[in-house]
Image (cartoon, helix red, strand yellow):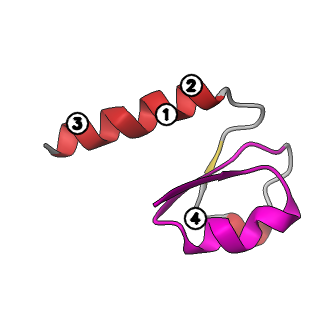
Amino acid sequence: MVAVGDSFGDMPMLQLAKRGFFVGHNLPAELSHVNHWPDANIEAIVENVLMSVSRKS
C-alpha cells in the first residue's frame, strides 16, 4: 500500500503504508521513513511508484 499525506492527521495512514510520501512542508520526525516531497504533484508520485514497480518485474 502506498499513502500520500500532507498533515499531522495523515500520520497513522503513512505509518501503516509500506511506502509513503509526505507532501507537506515540514516532515514530522515520526515520519522519517517516508519520502518527503514538499508540494509534489500527484502525477509525479504515481510515476515514481509505477517506475519502481516496473523495475521489480
Disc 4 or disc 2, which is closer to the eye?
2
Please say if 45 is above or below 53: above
Label 2 residue SS:
helix
Which quarter of the figure has residue 41?
top right
Q: Amino acid at mark 3?
A: Ser
- How many residues crowd around disc 4 within 10 Å: few (fewer than 14), some, or many (20 or more)? few
Number of other residues with Cα within 10 Å of mark 2, as a class: few under 14, some 14 to 19, many 20 or more: few
Name the residue: 63% across, 31% down: 42
Mark with earlier residue (1, 4)? 4
Mark 1 to mark 3: distance in Å? 12 Å
Q: Which residue is denoted by mark 3 in the rendering? A: 54
User: Of the residues shown, which amino acid type is indicated by label 1?
Assistant: Val
Contact check, label 4 and label 3, Cβ < 8 Å: no
For disc 4, the marked residue is: 33
Residue position for label 1: 46
User: Disc 2 marks which residue?
Assistant: 43
Q: Residues within 10 Å of mark 3 (few under 14, many from 20)?
A: few
SS state under label 1: helix
Magenta region: 1-24
Residue 7 lies left or right of residue 42; in this view the side is right
Please tell me which of labels 4 and 2 falls first in the chain.
4
**Distance (Cα) linking label 4 and label 2:** 21 Å
Residue at 67% across, 38% down = 37
* Alpha carbons under labels 4 and 3: distance apart: 22 Å
Residue 23 among magenta residues: yes
Q: Are marks 1 and 4 in contact (CB under 8 Å)?
A: no
Residue type at the position of mark 2: Glu
Q: Position of residue 11 (x, y in %)?
A: 75, 69
Tell me the quarter of the image containing the C terminus: top left
